[in-house]
């Protein structure tokens, strides 16, 4: 992920602006590029799609995925939905929060790890499930969770 | 000829180490100088056996599982490439009772074929449905689907043929086919399995739908929580274009159909069809009041078929084998097969495709083997977060839309989440309201405000504040949300809440168990719905 760069953002917007219903694909592209949606992106997108800034801001703030600030270098998403509840995800979350020293939705002070909640990763036969940087993990024991948290904090 | 070895690339298989197993098999084979062909298939859906490795032998495919990286050397030593016995050996895959007792129609190829090989797809009966459809008039395609009795597999169970007929007769310069693959219900993963394990069946189903109604553009709306499924779908679409099965001249017919897969952005409500359309158009996923129906005014205001992924993926076999073949499975008004997904606290979790009508008991014990924890089963939630909690005494309910409705439940997308006796149904009821508060689109008041009030009322009941009156208030609130919400989120969230109160009253009359410290933990987990 690279730091916010207005020219790069404009280039990504230009690639996608002609798609019907381009706004969500553009937001995904910007988040993929920079890790979050920089506030300066709003007027650029509004201009390209002939929308008001309020409309663009309304869409960014509606969807849980779109971040307003950069995440940690690694993102651990822990499923909190019913199937994982049935297999003890609440205890797993407590465990991860203790190990990482942050609550759900927070990033460690060294910027290495963001821990988030998610509702269903579609891995419900192997609950409790988590996803680390887009890779799925099933039947997650406290030991596996420790491994994920520790390796994120070690890696640069 | 080199031996074919199958290691799934399904996300669930990857989540328990399939990638490492695939690499270990490749390197072990190369260090032994053995020529193998490694195929990354989808999953057979027996997830407790993943990573499930299969070897093709003259006697058919032989299964081994769950295979770990560490067991690979031993498998080679034992001669697994010839299908020889090993402690992890499961025998011929097709003979495993879990699979053998299923009726796989929609999932006929999932886990068997190479998901990204169009030749493999065609060799296993793919595109026969499309060939038949191309010889039919649009009305005849719609009639065939209608005769099959196929109903929407997303949860609402609306007859697919009637929906298609409406779009067929709508006059417009442009029509669309949209696949709802925003599979957000906990306990469900059938859509993901198809996208990762047999994506061409969805492409074929959508192409047939497009021919039937006169649409030329399709969209698949998938989830950001499914990055592997998204990439598999993108690749499959690219291959279908290259081979002339999508684009200006579908299979040489002169008919056009373009298809694109789009990603949602973590909003559960976008599984509601009108929210999904708003999202596809690039807006907040707020629901649209109906009417107008999407079949009349859907995507970009044009007539649109919106179907669940499993519905569309069931169309090719209906066209291929005929409406009667499909309709002969099932019971009552629920025809064909249901893709049951066993989840939660279950020993043998996985996908079971069966004709409608088997009981919850047979699904959970016959296939699922009971709870994973070995403790007694206490509750099951069927149909996702908006589905009712059933007690053990309801396990005789057949899996059928009407039978579930008669017991104030909902079959939904076929997910069954099992809970053992450690579950606290008051906590589950509270979660249902919390989930609704987080995921409400905010369009209508009963859902937007009612869900937050619901969390508060249930917290008071748990804390034993004025319990009788608060239970009455909760009932009143649920009635208002049921009757007054614009869509199924606010309208159905009372199902889990009220079923929990009705069937598990003891959980709502315990001495106040939540200490202030625990209450603090609960509160800290809440995310404000509007950030």
Image (cartoon, coloured by chain):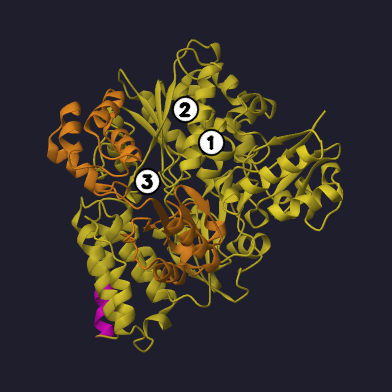
Chain colours: A orange, B yellow
Question: Disc 2, disc 1: CB below 8 Å?
Answer: no
Nearer-the-camera pick, B360 or B85: B85
Tell me the residue at 65%/25% (across/down).
B122
User: The residue marked by circle 2 belongs to what chain?
Assistant: B
Tell me the residue at 48%/29% (across/down).
B206
Nearer-the-camera pick, A148 or B1: A148
* B150 w.r.t. B164: above or below: below
Q: Give, as a single range, the part of the protein colored magenta.
A: B466-475
User: The residue marked by circle 3 belongs to what chain?
Assistant: B
Question: Which circle, 2 or 3, is nearer the viewer?
Answer: 3
* A93 w.r.t. B214: above or below: below
Q: Residue B467 in the image: x percent, y percent?
A: 28, 84
Question: Which circle, 2 or 1, is nearer the viewer?
Answer: 1
Tell me the residue at 66%/59% (across/down).
B367
Q: Residue A54 in the image: x percent, y percent?
A: 13, 40
Left or right relative to B91: residue B70: left
Q: Which residue is mark 2?
A: B209
Any mark on residue A107, and which? none
Q: Give the quarter of the figure containing the N terminus of chain B.
A: top right
What secondary structure prevails in the magenta region?
helix
Left or right relative to B499: residue A65: left
Give the mark, 1 or 3, whose residue is nearer the N terminus: 3
Q: Are marks 1 and 3 on the same chain?
A: yes
Q: Which residue is mark 1?
A: B313
Any mark on residue B271, and which? 3
Alpha-carbon span between mark 1 and mark 3: 17 Å
Q: Residue B257 in the image: x percent, y percent?
A: 44, 20
């Amino acid at each position: 992920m690279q730091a916010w760069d207005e020219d790069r953002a404009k280039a990504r917007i230009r690639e996608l602006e002609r798609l019907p219903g381009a706004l969500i694909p553009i937001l995904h592209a910007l988040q993929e590029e920079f890790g979050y949606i920089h506030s300066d992106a709003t007027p650029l997108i509004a201009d390209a799609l002939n929308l008001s800034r309020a409309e663009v801001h309304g869409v960014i703030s509606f969807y849980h995925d779109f971040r307003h600030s950069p995440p940690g270098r690694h993102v651990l998403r822990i499923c909190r939905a019913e199937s994982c509840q049935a297999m003890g995800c609440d205890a797993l979350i407590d465990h991860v929060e203790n190990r990482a020293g942050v609550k759900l939705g927070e990033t460690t002070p060294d910027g290495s790890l963001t821990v988030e909640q998610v509702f269903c990763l579609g891995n419900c036969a192997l609950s409790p499930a988590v996803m680390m940087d887009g890779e799925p993990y099933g039947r997650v024991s406290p030991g596996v969770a420790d491994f994920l948290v520790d390796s994120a904090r070690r890696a640069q | 000829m080199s031996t074919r070895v199958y290691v799934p690339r399904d996300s669930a298989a990857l989540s328990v180490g399939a990638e490492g197993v695939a690499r270990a098999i490749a390197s072990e084979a190369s260090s032994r100088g053995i020529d193998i062909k490694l195929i990354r298939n989808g999953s057979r859906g027996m997830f407790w056996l993943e990573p499930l490795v299969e070897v093709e032998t003259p006697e058919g495919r032989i299964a081994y599982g769950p295979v770990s990286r560490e067991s690979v050397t031993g498998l080679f030593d034992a001669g697994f490439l010839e299908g020889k016995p090993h402690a992890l050996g499961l025998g011929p895959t097709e003979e495993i009772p879990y699979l053998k007792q299923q009726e796989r129609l929609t999932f006929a190829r999932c886990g068997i074929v190479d998901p990204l090989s169009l030749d493999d797809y065609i060799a296993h009966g793919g595109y026969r449905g499309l060939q038949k459809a191309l010889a039919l008039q649009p009305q005849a395609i719609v009639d065939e689907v209608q005769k099959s009795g196929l109903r929407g597999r997303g949860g609402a169970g609306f007859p697919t043929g009637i929906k298609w007929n409406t779009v067929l007769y709508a006059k417009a310069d442009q029509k669309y086919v949209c696949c709802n693959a925003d599979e957000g219900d906990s306990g469900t993963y059938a859509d993901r399995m198809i996208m990762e394990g047999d994506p061409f069946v969805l492409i074929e189903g959508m192409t047939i739908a497009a021919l039937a109604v006169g649409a030329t553009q399709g969209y698949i709306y998938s989830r950001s929580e499914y990055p592997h499924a998204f990439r598999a779908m993108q690749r499959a679409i690219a291959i279908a274009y290259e081979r002339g099965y999508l684009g200006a001249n579908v299979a040489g017919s002169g008919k056009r159909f373009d298809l694109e897969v789009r990603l949602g952005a973590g909003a559960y409500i976008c599984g509601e069809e009108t929210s999904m359309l708003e999202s596809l158009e690039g807006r907040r996923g707020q629901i649209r009041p109906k009417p107008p129906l999407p079949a009349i005014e859907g995507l970009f205001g044009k007539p649109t078929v919106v179907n669940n992924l499993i519905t569309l993926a069931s169309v090719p076999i209906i066209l291929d084998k005929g409406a009667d073949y499909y309709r002969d499975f099932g019971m009552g008004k629920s025809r064909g097969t249901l893709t049951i997904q066993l989840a939660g606290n279950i020993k043998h979790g996985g996908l079971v495709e069966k004709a409608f009508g088997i009981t919850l008991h047979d699904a959970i014990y016959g296939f699922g083997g009971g709870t994973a924890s070995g403790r007694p089963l206490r509750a099951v939630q069927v149909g996702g977060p908006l589905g009712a909690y059933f007690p053990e005494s309801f396990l005789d309910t057949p899996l059928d839309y009407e039978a579930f409705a008669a017991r104030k439940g909902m079959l939904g997308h076929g997910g069954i989440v099992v809970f053992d006796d450690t579950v606290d149904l008051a906590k589950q009821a509270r979660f249902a309201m919390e989930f609704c508060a987080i995921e409400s689109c905010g369009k209508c008041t009963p859902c937007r405000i009612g869900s937050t009030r619901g969390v508060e009322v249930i917290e008071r009941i748990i804390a034993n504040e004025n319990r009788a009156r608060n239970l009455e208030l909760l009932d009143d609130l649920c009635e208002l949300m049921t009757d007054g919400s614009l869509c199924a989120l606010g309208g159905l969230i009372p199902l889990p809440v009220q079923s929990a109160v009705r069937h598990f009253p003891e959980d709502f009359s315990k001495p106040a168990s939540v200490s202030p410290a625990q209450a603090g933990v609960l509160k800290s987990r809440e995310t404000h719905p509007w950030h």
